[in-house]
Structures are given as structure tokens and as C-alpha cells.
């Protein structure tokens, strides 16, 4: 198969999708902002917001970007659901804008660009990361910007241009955005690793190793990431070690599966991993993506520099986490950035032959993605959460589903404030502490003492309460006896807060000296 020639811009007449892409994207942005205000924060969102009240160069669970963003927008907009989610919505819309703009530069006809735009406009992945505040959203945004920059150098290589000073700006910007991505999530290191692997596979790519710009980009990204390295150094590498352990070796979480023989469990885990990815990207588009990746892998030395770069950037995270899943199942969102280069490869795949069959396959995938996106919005329909809680199997739903359906957090916060009556509230789980702090009137400081559980970010905050000087505490959650023994308290009364189906614990105990 002949390698595709990549013009610098789209030369065919644009479809209505591309003519109206920006209004469609703005309409999507407006819809997301309306949804942002519609439902309470899920626990993890509240946790990241709570970090912003203890600004640091790093945190136990993640790098600090999500906390820094929350700090800025909580002050600009307010400590509300919109204040927490607004930057995520804008950044995800910005990522889609960069993707489609990049597609128009690297895809040789409007048909391929159109389908890249449609895929992202209807994508449930875009909806999720534009609605829920997580470190993945800034990680995707900055990684997408970095990918767009390095693709400019690949375009120059395909055009037979020798690396010169004009490439310096793109490599420097690549290093800048990689550094910002590192500050967002540790897994973003896979992007520069994939870029280096791609360059090593061709003579044109290896020319960049003889120029200083690639190394300047690496130095810049490390300088930007240096605060996180320093924080880990000051805290015995706690965050690095936790994420490494969490990603590849967490036997406790796999205890039930450990009873299954290893020879059965490993392929089963991989199947579960790929099933999760097919749901994330939707099944039809995921299968198309696997077909494209397989095709490019077979002709890895014949494809263009752009195709090779996109292939490695998609295959690295998908392949690495597939291998890791054989040992320990992780979160489905870990390789989510892979779908940015994979969507661009899908557009180039359509443009490569521009056949009706390929376009029809992607069209069916986009239809299914739209259905998935519609289903995601069901919990936001008035009355649905209340009806769902009446269903017999509600308690057996995954906690992530209950988090979306649970609308009792404001009531819970008010009842908790009444029960505390001015006393410090301490929760056994960091998610509960964050939810309590966000939804109690006045948003007071709520502490987490994770006795009986794994360490949390609260254990590494610089300012901690001195329980030896506090006479009364309302302790919420489990392991109350362990907490009282640790801090020399005795229980004075037991209270119940929250509704029967509320996600936070309903039991709370006032403890005193």
C-alpha cells in the first residue's frame, strides 16, 4: 500500500459539520455548563477541591495541577459546582478544538476531518471529562496541545524538510505542554516516550536526535515538573511509590480474583480491560481503531512520519496498560489520551481511500457514541435520581453510578452541621471529609483521619489539627474505636445524619476527652 501524501491543509469543500463546527462546539460547551450546575459534586471532585485549600507542590494521590486550577477558579467564580467544573468544561472543549484544527492540517480531505469532528462532538469520553472535574481533563488538554506541536515537525519531515531553527519553536512548545501535562497526571510521561520511539523508527526521525531542540524540550519539561520531584523528595517519594504500587501491584484490591488460577485470571483481566476500553470509546469506534493500529503496525516502516507518530502515541498507552492489566486491573480512564491520536488516525484512514465503506463504518460508530452520550445524561433528568433510589437493586450499583444519582449531599451537609454544633468534624475517609466540607454551611475545614485505611493526601498536608488541644470532635465513619484509642477520646453520643440512600456514612459519634 502506498504511503499517503499529506498536504498542509484541506483543499476540498467543507461539509456543513466543518462550516458550523465552532457554533456546534460552543453549543456543546453551553450545554455542559448547564449540566455542571445541575448536580452535586461526586466525592473525587470534592477531594480535589479540598486540596486547593491546602496548596502544595504535590499531593499523595496526584500532581498538583488539579488543585491549582481549583484554587484559581474557586476564587474567580466561587466554591460552587460551577466553580469546580467550569475550567474542566472549557479545557475539554479546548482540547476538541485543537484536535479538529490539527485534523484539518494533517488529513488530506474534508471527509476525514468531518468525521474527526463528529466523533468528538458526540463522544461520551468528551462528555465525561468535560463534566466531572478530574486530573484527566488538564492532562488530556496539555497532552493534546503537545501532540499538535510535535505533529508539525512530523509534517516537515514528510515534506522532506531538514530540521532547522524553524523547528525549534515547535519542540520548545512541545516541552512546555509536556511539562504542564506532567503536573496534571503521571501517566502523561507516555506521550514523550511514544514520540521518542517514533523518531527512532525512521531515518528522518533520527535526524532530530542530532539537533539540540529535542533535548531543550526535555530539559524544559523537567524544569516545569521539578516542584513535584522536590515534593516527593521531601516526602520520601510517597506519591511516586503510591502510584507505581496502585498501577501495577495492589494485591489487596484483587483479593477475590486471587482465588482464580493465574493462567485463567491473566487473559480474563485483559479481556475485561479491552471491554472497558470499548465502552469508553464505544465498541464500533474501538474495533475500527484496533483495525487501524494493526494495519499500521504491519507496515510500520512504510507509513508516513505523521502516521507513525500517531500510531506510537495511541499504541503506547493502550498496549502498556493492556500488559499491566494482565497482572492487576486498573482504571478504565488510564489510557484515555490514546483516543486523541487514534481519532486522528481514523480520519486519515477514511481519507486514505475515501471509500463509502470506511465512512459508513465510522458513521455507525458515531451513532452508537451518540446513544451512549444520551444515556449518560439520564441521571440529569429531573426526577430520575429519586426514582432510581427506589429500585430494589440500587444499593448494588457501582459506587460511581450512585455518586451521580445521589442528590442528598446538601441535606447531608446541613444535618452534619447541626450534629456537630460547632465541633470539628473528622471523617474516616477522605472522600467523606471533602463532601462534608463542601456542603456544610460556610464550608468549614473538615479533617480526615484515615485510621484503619490507606494513607491519603490529608496525611501529607503541612497544617494538621492538634487533637491533644481539641476537647470535642464529631467522628464520621468506621473505625471509631481505633480513632478514640489513637487520640484518647471517649464516645459521648451517637447520631445519624443523611438519608437512607446517601453515599456518605450515616453514623457519626461525638467523642470527648
Image: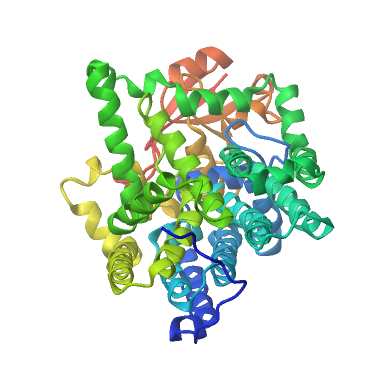
Position of residue 61 measured from the top left corner of the image (x, y, whole percent): 57, 33
What's the residue at 49%, 87% (across, down)? 13
Work out whether 105 lies above or below 511.
Answer: below
User: Taking the image as drawn, is residue 368 in sight?
Assistant: yes
Position of residue 44 measured from the top left corner of the image (x, y, whole percent): 49, 44
Work out whether 50 lies above or below 74.
Answer: above
Image quarter of the C terminus: top right
What's the residue at 48%, 46% (across, down)? 300
Position of residue 302 measured from the top left corner of the image (x, y, whole percent): 50, 51
Work out whether 475 lies above or below 288.
Answer: above
Position of residue 291 measured from the top left corner of the image (x, y, whole percent): 33, 52
Query: Quick check: 150 left or right of 513?
Result: right
User: Taking the image as drawn, is residue 256 in sight?
Assistant: no
Query: Quick check: 263 left or right of 123?
Result: left
Name of the residue lying farthest toward the left: 392
Q: Nearer the viewer, residue 373 or 463?
A: 373
Q: Nearer the viewer, residue 458 or 140?
A: 140
What's the residue at 37%, 47% (across, down)? 294
Name of the residue lying farthest toward the front: 2
Report the label total: 0
Q: Nearer the viewer, residue 483 or 78?
A: 78
| Colour mapping | rainbow
Image quarter of the N terminus: bottom left
Query: Quick check: 264 left or right of 487?
Result: left
Q: Nearer the viewer, residue 397 or 21?
A: 21
Amino acid at each position: 500500500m502506498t504511503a499517503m501524501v499529506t498536504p498542509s491543509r484541506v483543499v476540498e469543500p467543507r461539509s456543513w459539520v466543518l462550516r458550523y463546527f465552532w457554533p456546534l462546539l460552543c453549543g456543546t460547551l453551553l450545554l455542559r455548563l448547564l449540566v455542571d450546575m445541575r448536580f452535586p459534586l461526586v466525592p473525587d471532585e470534592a477531594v480535589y477541591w479540598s486540596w486547593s485549600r491546602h496548596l502544595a507542590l504535590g499531593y499523595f494521590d496526584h500532581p498538583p495541577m488539579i488543585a491549582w486550577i481549583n484554587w484559581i477558579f474557586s476564587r474567580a467564580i466561587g466554591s460552587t459546582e460551577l466553580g469546580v467544573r467550569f475550567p474542566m468544561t472549557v479545557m475539554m472543549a479546548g482540547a476538541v478544538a485543537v484536535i479538529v484544527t490539527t485534523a484539518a492540517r494533517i488529513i488530506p480531505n474534508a471527509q476525514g476531518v468531518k468525521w474527526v469532528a463528529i466523533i468528538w462532538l458526540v463522544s461520551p469520553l468528551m462528555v465525561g471529562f468535560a463534566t466531572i472535574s478530574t486530573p484527566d481533563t488538564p492532562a488530556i488538554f496539555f497532552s493534546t496541545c503537545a501532540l499538535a506541536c510535535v505533529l508539525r515537525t512530523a509534517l516537515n519531515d514528510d515534506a522532506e524538510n531538514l530540521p532547522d531553527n524553524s523547528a525549534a519553536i515547535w519542540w520548545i512548545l512541545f516541552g512546555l505542554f509536556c511539562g504542564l501535562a506532567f503536573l496534571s497526571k503521571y501517566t502523561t510521561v507516555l506521550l514523550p516516550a511514544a514520540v521518542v520511539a517514533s523518531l527512532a523508527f525512521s531515518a528522518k526521525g533520527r535526524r532530530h536526535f542530532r539537533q539540540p531542540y529535542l533535548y531543550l524540550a526535555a530539559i524544559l519539561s523537567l524544569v516545569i515538573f521539578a516542584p513535584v520531584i522536590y515534593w516527593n523528595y521531601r516526602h520520601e517519594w510517597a506519591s511516586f511509590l503510591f502510584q507505581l504500587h496502585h498501577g501495577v501491584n495492589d494485591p489487596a484490591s484483587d483479593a477475590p480474583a486471587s482465588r482464580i488460577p493465574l493462567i485463567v485470571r491473566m487473559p480474563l483481566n485483559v479481556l475485561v480491560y479491552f471491554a472497558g476500553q470499548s465502552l469508553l470509546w464505544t465498541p464500533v469506534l474501538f474495533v475500527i481503531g484496533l483495525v487501524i493500529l494493526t494495519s499500521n503496525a504491519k507496515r510500520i516502516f512504510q507509513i508516513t512520519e505523521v502516521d507513525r507518530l500517531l500510531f506510537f502515541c495511541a499504541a503506547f498507552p493502550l498496549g502498556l496498560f493492556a500488559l499491566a492489566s494482565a497482572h492487576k486491573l486498573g482504571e478504565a480512564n488510564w489510557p484515555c489520551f490514546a483516543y486523541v491520536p487514534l481519532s486522528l488516525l481514523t480520519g486519515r484512514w477514511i481519507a486514505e481511500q475515501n471509500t463509502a465503506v470506511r465512512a459508513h463504518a465510522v458513521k455507525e460508530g458515531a451513532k452508537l457514541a451518540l446513544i451512549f452520550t444520551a444515556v449518560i445524561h439520564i441521571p440529569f433528568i429531573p426526577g430520575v435520581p429519586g426514582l432510581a433510589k427506589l429500585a430494589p437493586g440500587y444499593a448494588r450499583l457501582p459506587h460511581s453510578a450512585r455518586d451521580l444519582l445521589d442528590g442528598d449531599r446538601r441535606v447531608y451537609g446541613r444535618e452534619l452541621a447541626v450534629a456537630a454544633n460547632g465541633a470539628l468534624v473528622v471523617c474516616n475517609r477522605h472522600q467523606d471529609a471533602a463532601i462534608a466540607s463542601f456542603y456544610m454551611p460556610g464550608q468549614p475545614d473538615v479533617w480526615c483521619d484515615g485510621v484503619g485505611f490507606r494513607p491519603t493526601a490529608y496525611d501529607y498536608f503541612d497544617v494538621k489539627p492538634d487533637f491533644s488541644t481539641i476537647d470535642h470532635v464529631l467522628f464520621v465513619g468506621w473505625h471509631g474505636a481505633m480513632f478514640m484509642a489513637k487520640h484518647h477520646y471517649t464516645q459521648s453520643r451517637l447520631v445519624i445524619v443523611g438519608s437512607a440512600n446517601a453515599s456518605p456514612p450515616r453514623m457519626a459519634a461525638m467523642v470527648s476527652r
